[in-house]
Amino acid sequence: MCTEYNKKRQREVNEYITTMHVMCVFIFMLALILNNKLYKDFLDLDLHFVFLIGLLVTGIILLYNKNRTLFNNKSLNVFDYMYIYFPLVVASVIIFKFGHGVFYSELILLIPVLLTASIIGKKSGLIMALVCSFVLVTYRFCFYEQYNIIRSIESSLILSCIIFVVGWFVGKMTELENEHKKQLTEIAITDVLTGLYNHRYFQDNFKQILDNYREESLSLIMIDIDYFKHYNDGYGHLAGDDLLSKIGDILKNNIPQNGFAARYGGEEFVVVLPCCNSSNAIIIADKIREKVKKHNFYGEEHQPGGRITISCGVATYPTHASSAKELLNHADQAMYKAKSFKKDKVELYFSVLDNLDVAEDEKDLINSIRTLISVINAKDRYTYGHSERVTYYSTKLAEKINLPNEQVQILNYAAFLHDIGKIEINREILNKKGKPTEEEWNILKQHPKWGSDIVKGVNKLQPVAKLILHHHENYDGSGYPDGMKEEGIPLLARIIRIVDSYDAMTSNRPYKSNMITSEVIEELERCSGKMFDPELTKHFIEIIKEENKIKTGVNNQSQ
């Protein structure tokens, strides 16, 4: 990807420059050794010592440079400084110790200027040129005074000008290349529409960011614009693009400096918050939600509720997940839960399975059940939201009839897992528009048994398996799979039966539109004593009326 490519290219450039540096030093060393005047002194301690030190330092730099990119725009360390100043030290030692015996020995001062300018840039290249010029003038003053000091200074000035031109030109070219590379990188990682990071950048860097904060909390916020398709269809794609751009601006201005936001895809965004726990992440998410809700967007008065709103899901590492993939998945689940209820809200990730205390040898099975739930979400997004809503309303009904806490807990597990058997059903059947064929219907009717078989391997879920098996039994005995009736159907299964049907009636499905609340109440009353337990139905209708704040006969659309 783009980031990896840039790192690879920088590493290759550094290796090329290091090799050039080493070759230049060795060429000059060879010139010294082969020079007739100095050949007899090759075995002298001084030259031998300089040569060995050069080999040693060069070897260290080469070894270090294999495993790390030098000058990564962060603070320089000792090896970076060594890489900068080693050529200068070598050049200075050579010309002061041996340079007077070699023609044009001062040209070795071009090496540190060339290396510094080509790696860091123009300013550093000119500074190194100034230092090298000072070394040159000092050398000429020390060794050429007895001949012609004025002529020596003049020649030093000419060579210094050449050194400065090399430092300026090479440094400027390096800066131009770096600016061009930076612009290309920004184009590659930026979403053109919103100005946020794009999906590629998020995917390339999220795991690395999480690895960097293994010892800290890291929170993830998934954001989705409510009813965006309705807005896009009503006002066109240009208005939709403008809406995405403005929400991108809101995100930029309302996240901490150490965090970042990215466009995840379509109308979805993601916010990464390092060193942030769940409580603070919820505060930040709610602040963003309020900012969006209070902002005046074009045409929002025709949106459901009269405002543009967002739904947010929050998950935190390591509280809710142990890996980047799991954290992203859990934040997505929390966001979809927020959308599945009343939208315009922030949801913290929670799963009823997290509270299930199972034996060590059953943990793998629980993890497998979690995986199956994720697969079902991918196959049929309705099923996940449906299970969450059935869990919510089943709990409310159980609390209304004063069931013991132990029974409520079992009901939570059963309601959440009641459709897990749909894992065995093809996506085409689950999302089919129109009524299923008789063959397809026979397949659909198998999911209670399949779901029961999946969970009954966990001892703690044995009572749940029975409820999953019978959650489609009707009060008059016309249901499936066993045709049980009245009190013969487990109480908790009767609760799920009512709530399951209620959510199906109030939700848009591939094969039908949702019903308004008054119509749902009429349908529940009509089916009371046939499909549903009459007493439980009466209590549940009271919950619906209270939650929707309506009286019978008033046409308000269900949330």
Image (cartoon, helix red, strand yellow):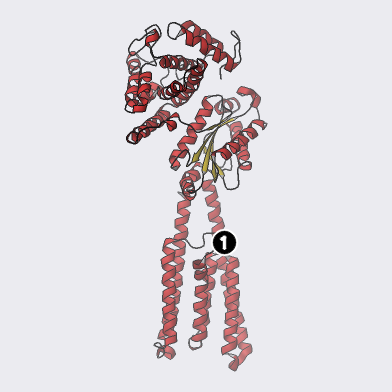
Nearer-the-camera pick, 461 or 266: 461
Instruction: Kindly indicate the quadrant of the structure image that contains residue 289.
Output: top right
Classify 10 Å Cα crowding around label 1: few (below 14), some (14-19), many (20 and above).
some
Residue shown at the point (45%, 53%) measured from the top left: 5
Residue 111: in sight, yes or no?
no
Is 424 placed above or below 105 here? above
> Residue 393 at what x, y percent from top left?
50, 20
> Residue 426 at what x, y percent from top left?
35, 24
Q: Residue furthest bottom?
A: 146
- Helix, strand or loop at label 1? It is helix
Nearer-the-camera pick, 516 or 240: 516
Residue shown at the point (44%, 31%) measured from the top left: 355
Q: Amino acid at mark 1?
A: Glu
Residue shown at the point (50%, 7%) measured from the top left: 525
- Left or right of residue 298: residue 365: left
Quadrant where the C terminus lies? top right
Nearer-the-camera pick, 77 or 309: 77
Is 153 placed above or below 470 here? below
Residue shown at the point (51%, 88%) measured from the top left: 100
Residue 225: in sight, yes or no?
yes
- Left or right of residue 495: residue 542: right
Is 367 placed above or below 78 here? above
Q: Which residue is mark 1?
A: 175
Q: Total label count? A: 1
> Residue 280 at what x, y percent from top left?
58, 40
Instruction: Kindly indicate the quadrant of the structure image that contains residue 368.
Output: top left
